[in-house]
Amino acid sequence: MRLAALPVLLSVAALFASCHIEKKKEPPVLNTIQLGQTAVSLTRVADHLEVPWDLEYDRKAHAILFSEIAGVIKRLDLNTHRVSPVARITEVYHQRTTGLLGMALYQPEQGPDFLFLSYTSKTGDSIYSNLLRYTYNNGKLEAPLRLLRIPGSTGHNGSRVMVAKDQKIYWATGDAASDTFAQDSTALNGKILRLNLDGSIPKDNPIPNSYVYAWGFRNMQGLTQSESGTIYTSEHGDAIEDEINLISPLQNYGWPQIEGKHDTEKEIAIAKKSPRTEPVRSWTPVIAPAGLAYYGADAIPEWKNSLLLTTLKSQSLRILHLSANGQQITDEAVLFSNYLGRLRSVLVLPDGTVYFCTSNRDWNPQKGFPKSYDDGIYCLQKTTDTTAPVLRPQKPAAAQNLSGKALYASYCASCHKTDGKGLLNTFPSLAGSRLVNGDKNKLVHILLHGASGNASDGVHYDASMPAFAFLKDEEIRVLTNYIRSNFGNASDTITLETVKNNR
Ligand code: HEC
């Protein structure tokens, strides 16, 4: 009887499988995140991606539309967890941080859907940042329209794009590594630009006949709007002072004259002469903030009225709790430090489900990454199943102590790497470096004043070395001696005297 029953059972199973072939295969829960009363599950819902840069929710298809930096747009079906290609944008110029960056999907009740794209292109020797509008028709991109083209560079091209509640496009542009663009209100770089959906200048922009809405920015990597309409950005500082800004029309956010809060005599004097707006939060040592999304849903009550921020250097998801009026950040919690790698973009669905993606195959991979399955898209969702290993949010790291190892990890390792070996053609190796082990004055000088394009070993480096003059003399002394006595280096010590003489 048993044997005879078997084929029937099998065919029922086969039938079951064929009926449900499109049913979502539930990925395993990797962790349970315990937040007060609420448990949240972490799952990886897509893998083997190439630097996904922006995630947008297609509510009509219940799918995530996402960009990959090399110029590809894909769709992740949230019913089946299948990823399928949508388009390749052949004009995209991808090198290191340039490429297909921010996107915004606009799906009104009436009329066609639009997909706005921000990407870099190259014509001859000139690099540009472009804002394009496509009609998004049932998974197809049609009728491209270039709304704006502005100067670009090998770095600092931003950018994020958003259609806000006022039905206007907000485009957060980078300063294209220029010293003058951000403070020049007639240049379109280092700005928040505001446009109509057809690319024209809104009649109610703060400066008549100008796209410029706010200025004084370096390189914004996150842009979002709260339920009550407040706009927030995240921005990369240079060697110090990463920022979250609250965006208001006509305000000047200070870069490059002011970094972070107005906390040096020079900065206070500049802000006194002509008004500058301070960030609502800044970080030194830097964390490399990236995607930003407002959480206003009820699903995870512990996160209601907060900003979710993905970070690259500190490899974390941060929960920045807002005050009731949204004007201040009142608390900060850190999830996933050094666990999933670099995190690039975050998206909140209307029901409060959170998706975010890694960026472990980008130009600056961190120790232990990429994993074979990188890059991935992850999901955070309220759960009642708490059997997976538990993670809890942490407080941000307290102020650093004075050890050379800790200072190096905070300020240097993101570029020169923990083992001092750097990244070929981008960041020089400090192991066996003539500059590190040679003339003490030269070494202290490069730390205090930075360097670009003039490496002592004759190699041209695409990136530049920021100035670390904000560090105390004692910190510079400890750091230079750390790099002179690690990574196989064994040179004699630098004194405080040498540091002081080079200030
Ligand atoms: C944002 C990336 C970045 C960070 C952070 C950074 N550097 Fe550099 N560093 C560079 C680049 C790029 C160069 C090459 C500059 C050039 O000459 O073109 C460089 C050059 C150097 C050199 C010269 C090496 C040689 O052989 O030419 C030293 C020494 C150095 N850095 C030390 C440090 C120390 C110490 C820190 C931390 C306080 C640090 N750097 C932080 C990017 C960085």
Image (cartoon, grey):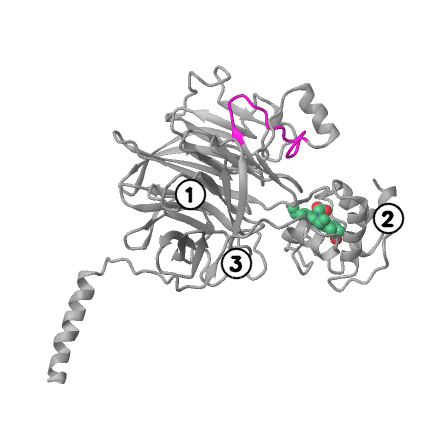
Q: Quadrant of residue 446?
A: top right
Name the N-terminal-most of marks 2 and 3: 3
Residue at 43% from the left image edge and 20% from the top image edge:
201
Rendered image quadrant of residue 434: bottom right
Residue 252 is a magenta residue? yes
Closer to the observer: label 2 or label 1?
2
The Cα atoms of the two marked residues, 2 and 1, are separated by 54 Å
Asked whether the residues under the numbered discs 2 and 3 touch, taking CB atoms below 8 Å apart as contact, a structural biologist would say no
Q: Amino acid at mark 3?
A: Tyr
Q: Residues within 10 Å of mark 2 (few under 14, many from 20)?
A: some
Give the numbered dot on residue 496. 2
Q: Is residue 176 magenta?
A: no
Q: For mark 3, what is the residue?
A: 339
User: Disc 2 beta carbon < 8 A from ligand 1?
Assistant: no
Residue at (54% x, 42% y) in the render: 331
Q: From the image, which quarter does the N terminus lie in?
A: bottom left
- Disc 3 Cβ-to-ligand 1 distance below 8 Å: no
**What amino acid is found at the position of numbered circle 2 in the picture?**
Leu
Q: Nearer the viewer, residue 87 or 437?
A: 437
Residue 142, how many percent across, how many down?
Answer: 31, 36
Measured Cα–Cα span from mark 3 to mark 1: 34 Å
The reply to whether residue 434 is visible in this rendering is: no
Magenta-tinted stretch: 246-262
**Side of 136 where 347 appears, left or right:** right
Helix, strand or loop under label 2: helix
Amino acid of disc 1: Thr
**Looking at the image, is 50 positioned above or below residue 303?**
below
Q: Which residue is mark 1?
A: 90
Per the image, label 3 sits on a secondary structure element best described as loop
Q: Are marks 3 and 1 in contact (CB under 8 Å)?
A: no
